[in-house]
Image (cartoon, coloured by chain):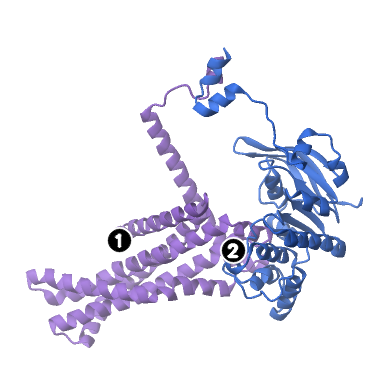
Amino acid sequence: MSDAQESPNPVPPNPLLALAERTGKWTMSSVTEIGFAFVLLLESFYWVIMGRSRKQPVRLPSIFVQCMDIGIGAIPIISAMSFSIGMMLAIQGIYSLKLFGAESKVVIGVAFSMTREFGPLITGILVAGRSGSALAARIGTMRITQEVDALRVMGINPVRFLVAPALLASCVMVPALTFLSILVGLSGAGIYVVVDLGMTFPAYIDNIIDILSVDDVMHGLVKSLVFGILIAMIGVVNGSSVSGGAEGVGKVTTRSVVQAISAIIVTDMIFAFVLTRW
Amino acid sequence: MTSKPAIEVIDLVTHYGNRRILNHINLTINTGEIMVIMGGSGSGKSTLLNHLLGLLTPSTGHIRLLGKDITKAKPMELTALRQKMGVAFQGGALFSSMNVLENIMLPLREHTNLDEATMQIMARMKMEVVSLAGFENLMPSELSGGMIKRAALARAIVMDPRVLFCDEPSAGLDPVVSSAIDDLILTLRDAMNMTVVVVTHELESAYKIADRICVLDRGDILAVGTVAEIRGSTNERIQNLLNRRTEETEMDPDAYLRRLTDDPLLPRAASR
C-alpha cells in the first residue's frame, strides 16, 4: 500500500492502453476546441447584435479593414486562379466529351461545376491560406505579447474587438469573392469554348444563363458562407490556443490552414451529398 | 496615509494545475499609496498582479478593487471598473497594427464619445507627460525599449485612472530613463492621488518610489512594510533578496539523484 503511494508510476505503460489514452485525450481536446469555436461564434453574434446597447459596439471601420484584408486584397489571386480553373474545365470537358462526339455539351458541365463546386472551393481554399492563417498568426502574436490581456484590462472585450469584425468580414467577403470567382471562371471557360468550338461569346453566355437556375448559384453562395465562417473560426480558435512563443505561432498558423482546408473540403462533400438529394 | 483601501486582497489562494501558486494572501493597499510588490522569480508576483487585474480567477478568496469584489462582478461592472484602472504591461503590449498616438487614444475611442480632435489633444498631453512628444506617428516596432514602456504608461494613464498598475516599469532600461519613470510615477500619485501598484525587482527603484513594500516568496507574503521596515527586517530570505545574496538551499542527496536520473523508484530504495 505504502509502496504504491510512494512511487508515482510503477506500472510499465501498456502500449494498447497508451494508445487508448492518446485517442481519448485527442478526442477530448478536439471536442473542447469545437465547443470553444461555437461559444466564440455565438459570442461574436451576441456582440454584433447587443454591442451597442452594452456600450461596446462592433465598429464599422474595423469591419471594413478586415473586408479589405480578406476580400479586396484577394481579388487578383482569386481571379487568376478561377480563370485558370475555368479554362482547365473547358479543356478537360471538351477532351472527354469528344469520346461521345458531344463537345457542345461542355457548357453544361462547366456551368454546373464552376457555380456549384469550383467557385466556392477555390475561393475557400485561397482565403483559408491567405486570411485564415493571417488571423491565426495575428491573434496568436497578440496573445503572446499580452496585447489580448491589454484589451481585457482596458475593458475592451477581445471577442468584440478582434473576432467579430473578422467573422463578419469573412461572412460578407467569401460569398462575394465566390461570386466573382464564378464569373471569372465561366469567362475563362468561355474563351476556350469560343475558340475551340467556334461558338460566339454571346451565344455561350445565353447558353450558360439557360442552363443555370438561381438555385445553382445559391447553392454555391450558401456553401461559401459556411466556408467563410469555418475559416474565421478555425483561425481564431487556433490563434487563441497558442503557446510557446514565436514557434508556437508558426505551428498554429500551419495548423489553422490545414484544418480550414480540410474542413472546407469535407463540408463541401457533405453539402454536395445532401443538396443533390433534394 | 490611512484613508479607505483602494485594493483589498482577502485570503487569496490560486493554483496552476495542481501546483499552488499563492497561499492565503491578505493584502490591503490604501488610496493614494504606492505599493511595490517584490519577490524573486517564481514567487507568484506576476500571478498576484494578474489576479488584481481580474485576468485570472482565484481558486478561493476575494479581491476588492475600489470597493467592488472583482471575483464576483458582472461583466458590465467589470468593464466600468476597468475604465478606472490603468495597466502598463512589462513588454508594453502596444498594438502593433496601430501607431503610438492611436494606441494611446484607443481607451478614449472605445469608452468615450469625445470628438477626434479632443481625443488627440488628450493623448498628446499624456505623451508630453511621458516625454514622448513628437513620436505620435511611429509604429511600436520602431520604438526603443524605453519608449515602448513610456508609451505603455501614457496609454495606461490616458483615462486618468484611480488605480495604476505597472509591471516591471523600469526593467531593462538605462538608469536615466528608469529614474525618469520613477519620478513620473511619484508625480502621478502626488498630482492625482492615484493609487499605484508596482511589480518590480529593481531594488533602487523600489526604495525610491515605495510607500510600502510587499515581499512575496514562494506564494507567501514574507513581509509588508515601509522601506525602512523592510530594509531593517531580520528575515533571512528578505535580506537575501535585498542584498543580492545567492540562496543556499539545503542539499537533499536523494532528491538530487532523483532529479538527475528521473527515476521515480529511487528515493524509496535510497531511504531504506
Question: Residue B225, can we see it?
Answer: yes
Residue at the spot 63% in from the left edge and 76% down from the top edge: B137
Find disc 1 in the rendering and name its residue.
Answer: A272
Give amino acid for label 2.
Answer: Arg
Quick check: A155 above or below A205? above
From the image, state whether disc 2 or disc 1 is nearer to you: 2
The chain under label 2 reads A
Quadrant location of the C terminus of chain B in the rendered image: top right
- Location of mark 2 (residue): A160
Dot placed on the residue nearer the N-terminal end, 2 or 1: 2
Q: CA distance from mark 2 to mark 1?
A: 34 Å
**In the figure, what tint was chain B given?**
blue
Callout 1: chain: A
What's under tag 1, amino acid-wise? Ala
The answer to whether one can see residue B114 in this image is no
Q: Are marks 2 and 1 on the same chain?
A: yes
- B226 left or right, relative to B98: right
| Residue at the (58%, 21%) spot, across then down | B254
What label sits on residue B34 in the rendered view?
A: none
Secondary structure at badge 2 equals: helix
Q: Please name whichever residue, B175 or A84, is drawn nearer the observer in this view of the structure.
A: B175
Image position of A12 with respect to B110: above or below? above
Residue B187 position by quadrant: bottom right
Figure quadrant of residue A150: bottom right
Q: Secondary structure at mark 1?
A: helix
Task: Name chain A's colour.
Answer: purple
* Closer-to-camera residue (B265/A239): B265
A104 over B215 or under it: above or below: below
Task: Identify which residue, A151 or B200, lies in the foreground.
Answer: B200
